[in-house]
């Protein structure tokens, strides 16, 4: 049986929530992780929910639905790897979901080169996420995305 996969949609700038809303109205499973940012306007502080991944929305669809989703307003394209739409592992989506539910302060950091000058292979499916726990910060590798997600308590 063919099952749906998670793909990354690349959206127009600042259109992540609009695209996620359109997908939801069309009953297409999607996820746009949010994080809280502080916006200082003169003497008042305002906390805003913004997308964690700029211009990205995750969508869980069958491969046959790619063309349908790509034609939706606000969608530029899918994120590609080796001439095919990149597939995100369910474990990584679950990890992002868990962290965004438990922590308000989330940040992203690109995967970097190791001290021995070997590149971290962000696309290695066999590599498990590296979890680093240093009080009070949690840092988890998302290899298929090429990022670390860093969670700190508010």
Image: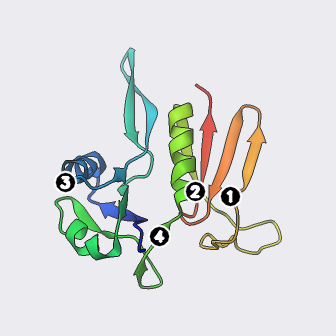
> Measuring 27% from the left and 71% from the top, which residue is drawn there?
65
Quadrant for the C terminus, please. Answer: top right
Rounded to the nearest angstrom, the CA distance separating label 1 from label 3 is 33 Å
Residue occupying the far top of the picture:
43
**Residue extending farthest front:** 1
First in sequence: mark 3 vs mark 4: 3
Q: Which residue is mark 1?
A: 129
Quickly name the residue at label 4: 87
Vertical placement of residue 52 versus 13, above or below: above
Q: Earlier in the sequence, mark 3 or mark 2?
A: 3
Give how far apart the Cα atoms at labels 3 and 4 are: 21 Å
What secondary structure is marked by label 4? Answer: strand
Categorize mark 3 by other alpha carbons within 10 Å: few (<14), some (14-19), many (20+).
Answer: few
Q: Residue at x 61, y 39 (%)?
A: 151
Return the x and y of residue 85 as percentages of the image width and height.
40, 75
On the image, the x and y values in percent for residue 95 come to: 57, 48
**Closer to the camera, 65 or 118?**
65
Q: How crowded is the residue under tag 4: few (<14 C-alpha within 10 Å), some, or many (20+)?
A: some
Badge 3 marks a residue whose secondary structure is loop
The label number, if any, that marks residue 91 in the structure image: 2
Question: In the shown orientation, is residue 102 left or right of residue 113?
Answer: left
Gap in Å between the C-alphas at discs 3 and 2? 25 Å
Please indicate whether residue 9 sits to the left or right of residue 24 in the image: right
Which of discs 1 and 3 lies nearer the camera? The answer is 3
N-term-proximal mark, 1 vs 4: 4
Secondary structure under badge 1? loop
Assess disc 1: are there few (<14), some (14-19) or many (≥20) residues with their C-alpha within 10 Å of its C-alpha: some
Give how far across and how far down residue 100 sits, in percent. 51, 39
Query: Residue drawn at (19%, 48%), measured in percent from left and top?
Result: 25
Q: Which residue is mark 3?
A: 26
Q: Are marks 2 and 1 in contact (CB under 8 Å)?
A: yes
- Residue 106, compared with residue 11, is above or below; it is above
């Amino acid at each position: 049986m063919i099952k749906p996969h998670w793909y990354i949609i690349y959206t127009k700038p600042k259109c992540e929530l609009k695209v996620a809303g359109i997908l939801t109205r069309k009953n297409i499973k999607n996820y746009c992780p949010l994080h809280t940012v502080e916006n200082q306007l003169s003497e008042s502080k305002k906390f805003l929910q913004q997308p964690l991944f700029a211009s990205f929305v995750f969508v869980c669809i069958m491969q046959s639905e790619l063309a349908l989703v790509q034609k939706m307003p606000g969608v530029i394209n899918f994120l590609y790897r080796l001439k095919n739409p990149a597939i995100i592992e369910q474990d990584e989506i679950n990890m992002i979901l868990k962290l965004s539910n438990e922590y308000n302060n989330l940040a992203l950091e690109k995967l970097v080169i190791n001290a021995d000058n070997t590149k971290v292979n962000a696309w290695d499916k066999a590599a498990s996420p590296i979890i680093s726990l240093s009080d009070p910060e949690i840092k988890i590798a998302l290899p298929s995305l090429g990022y670390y997600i860093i969670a700190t308590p508010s």
